Amino acid sequence: MNRGQHLLAIYETLNEHFGDLHWWPSDSPFEVIVGAILTQNTAWRNVERAISQLKSEGILSPEGILKIDDRMLADLIRPAGYYNIKTQRLKSFIRFLYEECNGDLDNMFAEDLWHLRGKLLKVKGIGEETADSILLYAGNKPIFIIDAYTRRILQRHDIIQRDATYEDVQSLFMTHLPESVPLYNQYHALLVNTGKFFCNSNPRCDVCPLYT
DNA sequence: TGCCAGGCCGGGT
DNA sequence: ACCCGGCATGGC
């Protein structure tokens, strides 16, 4: 079985086990973007608290984040950790959105995928995974997200080397799978769920569906 | 109680 | 081009 077939087999197994996960949990594309920044190296549970505070203050919008004072924003997102840095990251994204896209996400996502990705990567606080999460889950663009779970699972199954770069792993998925937003969406969600439920609590993976 | 969570940046080799 | 410390809360 070559690596492409292996990737498809893993998808089938996980999809059968978990079913449709309909990611990313959110009420709006903007909420996805905020979540993508807040969840950097942070448990999602804590991000939910932060987002719910932003909602209850009525500032979960580009204009809301633009206008709120840094100190107040930091206080609201405190549960997500790294609150000072993440305040700056949210603000720098908002500055980009206003300066380059007239403050409008529809304008932003009207750009060509890879061109927009390049621009997002220039925003301080947005790296590859965050950019790709924004593109796929907020913008419905066909790009595959690589995260720590994905790497661990693929390493464990000898599909990638430990020193594979982000681009190596991403192109592996994107050259072997059909280009499909729903597929990329569901596959990444499946990998994260697998990591959460089987790798963390059961590092030996005895009960992981990929081993049974 | 210490370690980790859906990373990224900046300074040092 | 890598490598590493810093960033911070909440759960187990």
Image (spheres, coloured by chain):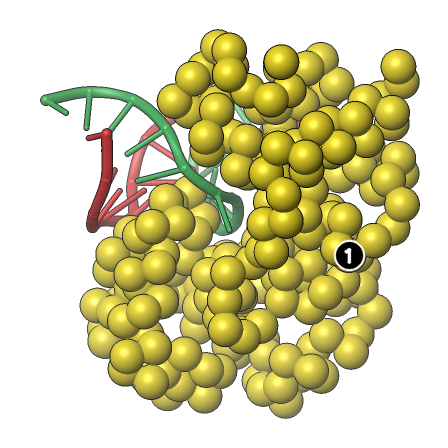
Chain colours: A yellow, B green, C red
Q: A39 above or below A205? A: below
Q: Quadrant of the N terminus of chain A?
A: top right
Residue at screen point 54% across, 31% down: A194
Residue at screen point 71% across, 13% down: A158
Q: Quadrant of the C terminus of chain A?
A: top right
Q: Of residues A171 and A102, which is closer to you in this image?
A: A171
Is residue C9 toward the left or the right of residue A82 in the image?
Answer: left
Q: Which residue is mark 1?
A: A181
SS category of the residue bearing label 1: helix
Residue at screen point 42% across, 43% down: A41
- Count neighbours of disc 1 (C-alpha within 10 A) and say few if under 14, some if 14 to 19, many if 20 or more: some
Q: A122 above or below C11? A: below
Q: Quadrant of residue A117?
A: bottom right
* Residue A201: x %, y % from top left: 38, 22
Q: Of residues A177 and A77, which is closer to you in this image?
A: A177
* Residue C9: x %, y % from top left: 20, 50
Is residue B7 toward the left or the right of residue A85 in the image?
Answer: right
Q: A144 above or below B2? A: below
Q: Of residues A47 and A164, which is closer to you in this image?
A: A47
Q: Chain of mark 1?
A: A
Q: Quadrant of residue A152?
A: top right
* Residue A102: x %, y % from top left: 63, 89
* Residue A25: x %, y % from top left: 50, 60
Q: B8 above or below A97? A: above
Q: Amino acid under label 1?
A: Val
